[in-house]
Amino acid sequence: MKRSLFPRAVTAVVLLFFYLPILVLVVNSFNASRFGSGWQGFTLTWYARLIHEPEIWRAARNTLIIAVSATLVSVALGTAAAFALHRFMGSRLQRLHYTLVATPLVVPEILVGISLLMFFVAAGVGLGLFSIFLAHVTFCISYVAMVVLGRLQDFDFSVIEAARDLGAGWWQTARRVLLPMLFPGIVAGGLLAFTLSIDDFVITFFVAGPGSTTLPIRIYSMIKHGSPPLINALSAILLVITFTAVLLSQRLSRVKNQPL
Amino acid sequence: MGRETRLKIQEWLATLPSLFWLAVFFLIPTLMVFAIAFRPADPYGGIGPGWTLDTIRSLADAHYLAIAWRTFWISGLTTLICLCLAVPTAYTIARASARWRTTLLMMVIVPFWTSFLVRIFAWKTLLHPEGLIKRVLVVLGLAGPQTQLLYNSGAVVLVTVYTFLPFAILPIYAAADKFDFRLLEAARDLGATSLRAFLKIFLPGIRRALVTAFLVVFIPALGSYVIPDLVGGPSSEMLGNKIAQRVFVDRNLPHASALSVVLILAVLAPLTAVLFLQGKKGRPELFIREGE
Amino acid sequence: MDGFLEFQNVSKRFGSVQAVENVTLEIKKGEFFSLLGPSGCGKTTMLRLAAGFEHPDTGRVVLDGEDITGLPPNKRKVNTIFQSYALFPHMTVRENIAFGLRIAKKPEKEIKAEVEAMLGLIRMKDQAQKKPDLLSGGQKQRVAVARALINKPSVLLLDEPLAALDLKLRQRMLIELDMIHDEVGITFLYVTHDQGEAMSLSDRIAVMDSGRIEQVGTPAEIYETPRTSFVAAFIGDTNFFEGEVGAVVDAEYCRLRVEGLPDILCFNDKQIQPGNSVSLSIRPEKVHISRDKPEESADRNIMPAVVEDAIYLGSNTKYWVRANGHRIQVMRQHFRFFLDEKPIRWNDPVWIWWHADDGFMLDRFRKADAGLVALPPQKVGESDEGSMKG
């Protein structure tokens, strides 16, 4: 059967489209030219300058603190949510639960941001690292839940029955069978939450206070008022970090039978 | 009856943590936005006392209508372009051999996970008057020295497509992967052309994924804020920008809320339409997010 | 009741489906007992009730005199072999087998010794360190058996364990299961839809349909003396005749008046009196077929027929003949070199006969059950209803 070249041509264009800006960015981070308008020699000055920016380090530190803590909490809550959604699927409570968990995935970030801002203002919660942490957990729960739910749906529950059949109580079954089998999925969800937290701008922007800058916020102000080459260098570094994290997540969330 | 209650308790114990968190930090804040839209603005910034409909009424202005309309058509155009690009791409990946498939999927996902701001900035550089693309176009004679690639609606559409295209590709790919391509062969066997088989058999076969892809691009696009802010001009202001302006510049929270309500309704409209149409077939699944 | 494992008036409903309806069953200690029936007949539910994964709506489950109805699965001295084996994928073969003993907090030395013994029994000592995804179907099944048996359960429950295996492997595992049962001596409760498995392995079989027990007996009893048309038709093939008792011939026999056929002499073990209607089942292998008219005899039922279909199967041939409106299935084994004889072909006039002792009267006949016997359709598009007449 003759296969049309059209889909493959489109795919090639799409992939080119995807990678062009990134390649230009990385190349330019080594470009001695200040405005990226033509190659002016290879240099590492921008990376060097970046390392000596205390603002950047502070922002990076904040970002990391928030990401780690938000990941831990959202993984705990998201895994429990996925478990409930799967085990008790169909009940009225779970249908409500599912709506509540799935909706943040479709709502534009600006809505989440503004609603949380108003909530914090009204509740008297000061805007700072803590408010950012609360916001990040809120949107990460949904993602973790969906990833773990996906793994649960492929889960052969007769294994749980087998454990019970062989004498294990509920806690023993969870500890020795359920959680170890679910572990890769949970880690995948955690890595996802981590990357989302590190990368979040809009929601963070709305609920951040003075002195609680994160890396994305710093990048934003750099884009608006700063030096382009530094941003290139910073972006290249972030690229490598997220690329590694995503690779790991992919490996772990892959169901065993799929070809790698 | 003891077993039934025990099961119920188990269910509540497992559900309560996430339910509680999301109710407090998602549901209630959203309701608050609705509430604050009915308060007046304090002239010194913040929320004034009492309740009023003035804030809502002030939305019925040609200015806001224009912004709403622009938000709508930019999102719509973006979604359309994304779907048109996503379908052939997802098709190619699904038809590829196992080894290629994984590579291609990774290639689609990787840029997706680089920093959102970074990618927008990369386009800003590329579309810059002295950037790479402008110079190539000038060399090819497709643009004059004065052509502005940046700071207009075109740039907004381009970058928004770039940002959301992977969201469109993945669900369509997930469905294409499960699609039985022998159906197309059967159609060819019965005399249909490739194109006909594609339109009449493949597209309807992945209907649900197309709807998912539509929602997953259109709705977040409606709420675009950063993209028009960084690569759009004054003439490409969207709802998101206006809301941000009201919050950070004008410090007029009730007005920002009112605009947010408009955005919420704009988001709910396609969602409810889809859920209503799909809800009859049992559990509507909004997402099949492979590879996340 | 002196059964070892007993179900007493057990019922279970799922939504609008009555999976098990008022079933009473007793299984003797040490026997290999099978629950046999089509999909949806309730046999798996019965197994799960015994294991503790389902709780009966009414009735009790009793094991060795003790009421275990309220006990959760982990507290019952019963172990299950699941259809999908359900081996723990993140544990090695050795760890899988040791699981039950670890949970029971047996001393380490004892666990080690028992596991080694089990590995020897299933002949997998050299695969002990492998994880399940590297094992073949047959190996996984053996590990599942070992994992269950090591706990020395009172009853071993097997849920269609051979269903996922291909034919040759299934035949081998059948023999292995049989050997394990003989060696270990534990009571086996085996669930299957495959009559071959049930008949070859079991001491006794319970045939189930739609949540009820149709008949309990040894394989030979089930086969030769089916109580109902369901049992007669589900196990093997059979022919049904409906008629009225015309006359009682002596203490043991009677004549059956069947429309269109000469009177049929049959064994009257139920002492049915004239005037009552009765259904008769006669298995195809008990019917003889030949070109020449057989010798008349007082205890033979002889009638002429025409061959409608013949399927040659190598060691035997199946014929469908029509005798005055009745379709009858005959199975003829080829005792002699087949190519030496003049074969019986389509449309040939033939004689069929059977001994009066070889038919069996059913307690209950349902028209629908006749459809379970696989008859070839007579026209393209004809539905699968084995109607005896026309």
Image (cartoon, coloured by chain):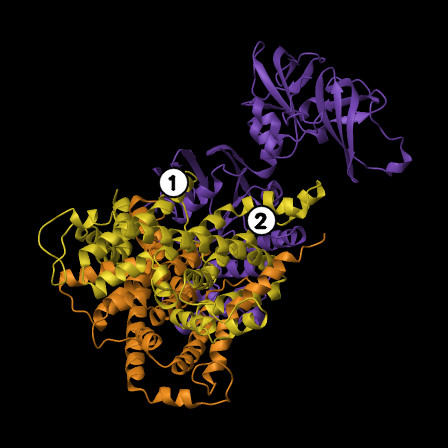
Q: Would residue C121 be visible to someone looking at this image?
A: no
The amino acid sitting under disc 1 is: Phe
Where is residue B52? Give x, y as percent.
Answer: 13, 48
Which secondary structure, mark 1? helix
Task: For chain B, give the colour.
Answer: yellow
Q: Which mark identifies residue B276? A: 1
Where is residue C140? Give x, y as percent.
Answer: 55, 60
Q: Residue shown at 36%/67% (left/top)?
A: A193
Task: For chain A, give the colour.
Answer: orange
Left or right of B21, for residue A234: right
Q: Which mark identifies residue C163? A: 2
Q: Residue shown at 23%/58% (left/top)?
A: A115
Chain identifier, colour purple? C
**Distance in Å between CA atoms under marks 2 and 1:** 42 Å
Q: Residue shown at 50%/62% (left/top)?
A: A255
**Looking at the image, residue A161 lies above or below residue A33:** above
